[in-house]
């Protein structure tokens, strides 16, 4: 059996961990990885050399500067420039090394702040972006355009995936810089251990978010990589915007999800809202019809995913 060599960039992150696990289940894939310390993907020379040495058949691009609403808001240059540098370096090197199929990870925040819900792929660039993550969103939009430009100019099959908000094993639990779910898992857990009377939840509690368990995204990526050439070509032909949403198809308010985390952790105290923190986009529920039509659907319910994520937190991060 000839193995397909797949480079998973950013394999130690939340999404990269799930993708690597999903691909390693199949003997027909040889997964190639490098830690950030071994290969800085912002370094275009080193990245080029790595690709020319390894010559992977496919690439899954999970390496990026990633963070929650406050990190995005406070470090706009880092989110714009680091992501642009990583993307330029990987796209150029992958193309030069003859990579034909690539999955680039974008994000649901690329869509206009106030666009109709659920959000279809063709709403891209139809209105202004949310201010708290505009630099990151613009870098990701450039990534979508890179996929399309390579497909148009060189006939490659580069596809940009737009996942909703993710959570799961190996998440970033930084108290300030993480996303809402890992932040709340940690905060409720610490309040329970210390017997604190209340836990702070940022913003008004009213924004709505759609949450997907990271292992479901790993499964979706494996599903897409395994599509036959003719089908993958319908997503990445020169005349098609090469982007596809990945989500669960339903959302909850931040207050509701905070209550769910409280129940999962088993915390008895009060929940207090901190209105000095930003709400961000009011709602971003993805239309997942395109992926569903190909035959893929998310499996993990939010309460079950949260139980598993909390278990992972207790084992590795508490
Ligand atoms: N988490 C989420 O809710 C969502 C994530 N996404 C997208 O999915 C992708 C993965 O996100 P996620 O797994 O959450 O992010 P993480 O922060 O968990 O992981 C990112 C990975 O990229 C690596 N990395 C960052 N910079 C470099 C670099 N210069 N060279 C080499 N490696 C680097 C990191 O290594 P190190 O830690 O050592 O720096 C880390 O392993 C990103 O593109 C993100 O935009 C999209 C929607 C939602
Ligand atoms: C994936 C996505 O992630 C980011 O966008 P976001 O969806 O706004 O992400 P978030 O998870 O940080 O917040 C969601 C909501 O939750 C509220 N919230 C309450 N309490 C906490 C809290 O303790 N921490 C955080 N981070 N948020 C909190 C917070 O105020 C907001 O209303 C961008 O990086 C964007 O670029 C991106 O791609």
Image (cartoon, grey):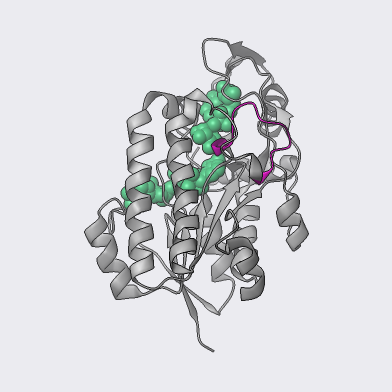
Q: Position of residue 284 (x, y in %)?
A: 66, 33
Closest to the observer: 145 or 316? 145
Numbered range of the magenta stretch: 109-121
The N terminus: image quadrant? bottom right
Visible residue check, residue 114: yes
Residue 113 among magenta residues: yes
Closest to the observer: 16 or 103? 103
Q: Position of residue 43 (x, y in %)?
A: 25, 53
Magenta-colored segment: predominant secondary structure = loop
Q: Which residue is painted at 61% across and 13% down in the image?
A: 273
Q: Which residue is painted at 60% across and 34% down in the image?
A: 126
User: What number of labels is visible?
Assistant: 0
Closest to the observer: 272 or 108? 108
Q: Which residue is painted at 38% across and 59% down in the image?
A: 91
Q: Quadrant of residue 124?
A: top right
As drawn, 299 above or below 137: below
Q: Position of residue 253 (x, y in %)?
A: 71, 25
Residue 152 among magenta residues: no
Q: Quadrant of residue 234?
A: bottom right
As drawn, 3 above or below 86: below
Closest to the observer: 179 or 233? 233
């Amino acid at each position: 059996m000839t193995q397909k060599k797949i480079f998973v960039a950013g394999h130690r992150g939340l999404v990269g961990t799930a993708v690597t696990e999903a691909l390693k289940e199949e003997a027909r894939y040889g997964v190639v990885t490098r830690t950030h310390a071994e290969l800085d993907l912002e370094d275009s020379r080193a990245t080029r050399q790595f690709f020319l040495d390894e010559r992977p058949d496919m690439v899954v691009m999970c390496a990026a500067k990633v963070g929650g609403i406050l990190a995005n808001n406070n470090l706009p240059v880092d989110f714009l420039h680091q992501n642009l540098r990583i993307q330029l370096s990987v796209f150029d090197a992958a193309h030069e090394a003859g990579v034909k199929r690539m999955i680039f990870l974008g994000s649901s925040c690329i869509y206009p702040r106030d666009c109709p819900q659920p959000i279809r792929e063709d709403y891209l660039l139809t209105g202004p972006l949310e201010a708290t993550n505009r630099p990151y969103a613009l870098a990701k939009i450039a990534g979508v355009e890179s996929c399309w430009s390579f497909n148009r100019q060189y006939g490659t099959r580069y596809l940009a995936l737009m996942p909703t908000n993710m959570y799961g094993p190996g998440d970033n639990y930084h108290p300030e810089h993480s996303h809402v779910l890992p932040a709340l898992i940690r905060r409720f857990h610490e309040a329970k251990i210390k017997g604190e009377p209340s836990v702070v939840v940022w913003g008004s509690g009213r924004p709505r978010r759609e949450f997907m368990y990271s292992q479901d995204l790993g499964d979706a990526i494996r599903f897409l990589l395994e599509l036959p050439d003719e089908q993958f070509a319908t997503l990445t032909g020169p005349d098609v915007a090469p982007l596809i949403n990945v989500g669960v198809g339903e959302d909850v308010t931040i207050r509701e999800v905070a209550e769910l985390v409280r129940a999962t952790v088993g915390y008895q105290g009060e929940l207090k809202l901190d209105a000095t923190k930003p709400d961000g986009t009011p709602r971003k529920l993805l239309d997942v019809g395109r992926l569903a039509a190909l035959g893929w659907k998310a499996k993990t319910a939010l309460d079950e995913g949260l139980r598993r994520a909390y278990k992972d937190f207790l084992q590795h991060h508490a």
